[in-house]
Amino acid sequence: MKTSFDRAAKTYDENAIVQALSSDYLAGLCSKLVRSVDPPPITVLDAGCGTGLTSLALRRFFPSIDITLCDISERMIAAAEAKIGNCKCIVHDMETYEFEDHYDLVISNLAMQWLEDFEAFLEKVMQRCEYLAFSVPTHESFLDYKRLFSESGIDILAIECMVQEAVIDAAMRHGTLVCSHHRSYSLHFSKALFAAKHFKNIGAGTPRQQRMQSKISAVLASAKEEICLNYEVLFVILKRAA
């Protein structure tokens, strides 16, 4: 995974259309939270920050917040730091890193779907923050793309996104639910090959897919029709339990 994201650091921003839109929406939810609590959050951890789109969006609302960036990819972190400036950086897998500091707010935009143990991460991070604001694609995402490959017996996605209700249930086991929102985003491509390139350019290619490349290439070569990539995104804000 690290290799895929390192390779995508240069192509990420021009292809991360949905990630940018969801960053803006998540930052907007956080801005309402910040204005509603006293004292307002000052220290922020961006977990799985990528190229820093969410931190940049949040800093537009609150220029003085103290941001720490965390990502497994050194190249992604470098791109994020160039955008954000005046921030701390942790180059490490957010799932295995033992955070030592305490944060007023942890944000994570379209990154927690990569976790091997979603609940273990929730438990860990909620011990280190007052609020967690995150977004994840849900199980209903990428239906046309998954269907195209499943017809050829290929499980194309590197991850199996969680059902929306399961995400909310897990979240509520580790904190108090402040709010949850669902939004749909769609990207249209003239053929499936360009959808596959989109995933690669945002770092979503995996070694498992590379090992199946000949089968995948055959499906992509035969798929000539327009395809829609639907992102069904769940946004959640949790408060640390008293």
Image (cartoon, rainbow, N blue to C red):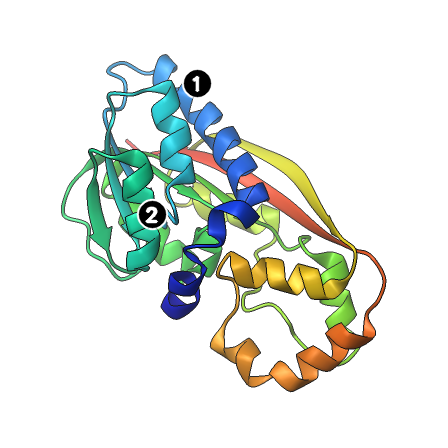
The answer to which quarter of the image holds residue 41 is: top left
Does 218 sit left or right of 119 as displayed? right
The percent position of residue 215, horizontal first and vertical second, equals 69, 84
Q: Nearer the viewer, residue 106 or 204?
A: 204
Disc 2 marks a residue whose amino acid type is Ala
The percent position of residue 43, horizontal first and vertical second, equals 22, 30
In the picture, which quadrant includes the C terminus? top left
The residue most toward the left is: 100
Does 59 sit left or right of 159 as displayed? left
Disc 1 marks a residue whose amino acid type is Lys
Asked if marks 2 and 1 touch (Cβ < 8 Å), the reply is no
The percent position of residue 71, horizontal first and vertical second, equals 31, 53
Does 10 sit left or right of 84 as displayed? right
In the picture, which quadrant includes the N terminus? bottom left
**Could you classify mark 1 by the number of other residues whose Cα lies within 10 Å: few (under 14), some (14-19), or many (20 or more)?**
few
* Residue at point 55%, 63% (across, down): 200
Q: Which residue is mark 2?
A: 79
Q: From mark 2 to mark 1, how far is it between C-alphas?
A: 27 Å
Q: Is residue 4 above or below residue 37?
A: below
* Residue at point 44%, 28% (across, down): 27
The answer to which quarter of the image holds residue 80 is: top left
> In this rendering, does residue 126 appear at all?
no
* Residue at point 58%, 32% (across, down): 181
Q: Which mark is residue 52?
A: none
**Of callouts 2 and 1, which one flags the residue occurring earlier in the amino acid sequence?**
1
Q: Which residue is mark 1?
A: 32
The residue most toward the right is: 225
Q: Secondary structure at mark 1?
A: helix
Q: For the image shown, how many numbered marks are present on the structure?
A: 2
The percent position of residue 127, horizontal first and vertical second, equals 24, 43
* Residue at point 27%, 62% (across, down): 96
Q: Secondary structure at mark 2?
A: helix
